[in-house]
Amino acid sequence: MAGAADQGTWGCGAGASLDWLPAQRSESATSWTATATQDEVREDERTAASMGISAVPFFVVDRALGASGAQPAEVLLDLLERGWAVRPAMSVVAGGATCDVNGC
């Protein structure tokens, strides 16, 4: 869609607009041209491919659990809860002075 970025719309659907975010509109519309952005996206694609992901949407929790395709909220909640239940305990390798809600 030639010129769409200049008009504040993207080719992702009729009426899609960045007008609600005017401060970042210009940066968002042109950031894909930055080589660093393209490199980051390509790296994300390689990571996804290494995990067996070949389509979107795909939801990944802790690089261990996933759900492919559009899912209802209940399925995503179950995915998050299962991820929380099987998460490894954090190993604390050093201790020191700490603070909490009651002070230090």
Image (spheres, helix red, strand yellow):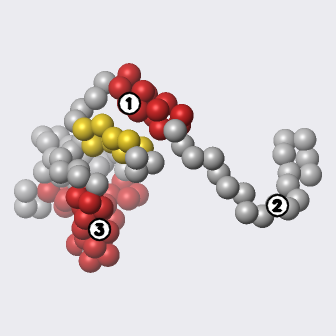
Q: In the rendering, at what x and y percent does residue 71 appear?
A: 28, 29
Mark in the foreground, 2 or 1: 2
Residue type marked 3: Glu
**In contact (CB < 8 Å): disc 1 and disc 3:** no
From the image, tell me which residue sits under label 1.
76
Q: Mark 3: which secondary structure?
A: helix
Measured in 3D between alpha carbons, the distance from the residue under mark 1 to the one under mark 3, in whole angstroms, is 25 Å
Structural crowding at the residue carrying mark 2, measured as other residues with C-alpha within 10 Å and reported as few (<14), some (14–19) or many (≥20): few
Task: Name the residue rendered at 27%, 43% in the picture.
Answer: 58
* Residue 9 seen in the figure: no
In-image side of 50 versus 3 (left or right): right
Q: Which label's residue is closer to the chain start, 2 or 3?
A: 3
Measured in 3D between alpha carbons, the distance from the residue under mark 2 to the one under mark 3, in whole angstroms, is 36 Å
Measured in 3D between alpha carbons, the distance from the residue under mark 2 to the one under mark 1, in whole angstroms, is 36 Å
Q: Mark 2: which secondary structure?
A: loop
From the image, tell me which residue sits under label 2.
95
Task: Name the residue rendered at 65%, 51% in the picture.
Answer: 90
Numbered badge on residue 43: 3
From the viewer's perspective, is residue 9 above or below residue 28? above
Q: In the rendering, at what x and y percent does residue 92 appear?
A: 72, 57
Residue type marked 1: Leu
Q: Which label's residue is closer to the chain start, 1 or 3?
A: 3
Q: Which label's residue is closer to the chain start, 2 or 1?
A: 1
Residue type marked 2: Gly
Mark in the foreground, 2 or 3: 2
* Residue 4 seen in the figure: yes
